Amino acid sequence: MVDRQITPASKLGDQGNVLSNAARLFREKGFERTSLKEIAEACNMLPGSLYYRYSSKEALLVELMRRGVDLVTTEVETAYASSDDPVERLRLCINAHLHALLVDSDTVYVLLFEWRSLSAEARGDIIALRDQYESLWAEIIETMIEQGVIRKDVNARLLRLIGLGALNWVATWFDPKGVYTLDGIGDFVWNVIMDGVIRKSVRT
Amino acid sequence: MVDRQITPASKLGDQGNVLSNAARLFREKGFERTSLKEIAEACNMLPGSLYYRYSSKEALLVELMRRGVDLVTTEVETAYASSDDPVERLRLCINAHLHALLVDSDTVYVLLFEWRSLSAEARGDIIALRDQYESLWAEIIETMIEQGVIRKDVNARLLRLIGLGALNWVATWFDPKGVYTLDGIGDFVWNVIMDGVIRKSVRT
DNA sequence: GTCTATACGTAGATAGAC
DNA sequence: GTCTATCTACGTATAGAC
């Protein structure tokens, strides 16, 4: 308890969490509506100090998005590896994507919703990384088609785009305190994709 | 050909299309990355002149979003009225939503993707309008459940949120010059929602 | 209705002390 | 590594002439 009051901001040791504070703010308010002053404040620093770590506001955003891709890729890959049944695996991957996007970090949200804030140069890099992530989904779906779980006449690319779109948009309305759990939502999407909603005369 | 060269910007008569120029720019670059100077340039005006029509940059955005809601509502209502078959009607409404969002105007895109640029006060108004539009979809879906076309155990609200999400996200990747037509995409979504993608032993 | 001129704030960024 | 101090640019917005 020595030297406690009025501890200089510089001593509080916010070390590596500039990124997580920035991610939270970018998610809450958007990239250009968040100033470096606000980010610095959240880190108990002053604006100029941020430049010791990142060469520009955009460099910060880019680094944050890279981590977003890493995170969601890792989580979906882990889910994929955790089951042998292709249908159950799809369910787990859907829920992993939703969790990475909405629970485990703010970086995935920023990655998906703030990419228009990137300069043309940086955009190319990030889009490439995101495409790499999506290729993981392409693989999941194509495997299901090959294994005969999904009908062969279904367009795999459209299914991926539409399915991921349905999941991504959840981020615009999901309320952690609301009536739906994230897993409930994920399972719903999974059910609709697999079975559809139509009332059928004959069902197995 | 009298008095042709160096026609003053003020004489070009860009009358009512400040909104459409703004909508296009907001869509292409986002609200805060678009300056009033750019909007004015697109209208062959100077920044100050815009204030004759709109009291602030936000007032412009709000007006533009109002028109977005009006447009998409009208188009979906028209589609709804154009068929008596509930399943076909759903298909038409899905395609109407996509067309309003991606072909007929930039305002719907701005409505859906730039609402975070609104102040807290304006946001309430716009969200209310958007909710009103979504209630139209609630009606479409609930009618289908009542008529026994959609299974009664399907959560109508989740179906609406997920379905509209799948459609809205199309705006992030759709390429008019690409391999998919908008109607093709709409029909694909409609098919997945109704039938699912699973390979079934018995199919009608 | 549009222009001219400009006020005012705040943004991102930098240099050098500590 | 962070702070102090500051530069420069650009944003929205306003007042008054035309």
Image: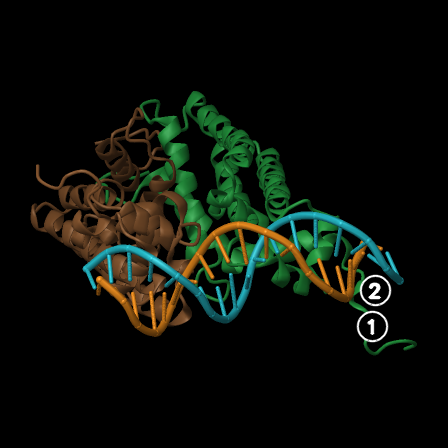
Chain colours: A brown, B green, C orange, D cyan
Q: Quadrant of the C terminus of chain B?
A: top left
Please name the amino acid that badge 1 sits on. Thr
- Separation of disc 1 and disc 2 at Cα? 7 Å
Question: Percent x, y for residue B70?
Answer: 62, 38
Q: Position of residue B24 (x, y in %)?
A: 59, 57
Disc 1 secondary structure class: loop
> Is residue B83 positioned above or below A68 on the image?
above
Q: Residues within 10 Å of mark 2 (few under 14, many from 20)?
A: few
Q: Is residue B124 visible?
A: yes
Q: Which mark is residue B7?
A: 1
Residue toward you, B119 or B68? B119
Residue at 67% across, 61% down: B40
**Chain at tag 2:** B
Chain letter of disc 1 in the image: B
Residue A164 visible, this angle? no
Disc 1 + disc 2, Cβ < 8 Å: yes
Judge whether B2 appears above or below A183 on screen: below
On screen, residue B169 versus residue A181, left or right, reads right
State whether discs 1 and 2 lie on one chain.
yes
Query: Which residue is denoted by mark 2 in the rendering?
Result: B11
Q: Position of residue B56 (x, y in %)?
A: 64, 46
Question: Which percent across, then down, holds residue A126?
Answer: 31, 64
What residue do we see at 22% from left, 41% from top? A6
For mark 2, give the secondary structure: helix
Which of the two residues, C11 or A76, is positioned nearer the viewer here? Answer: C11
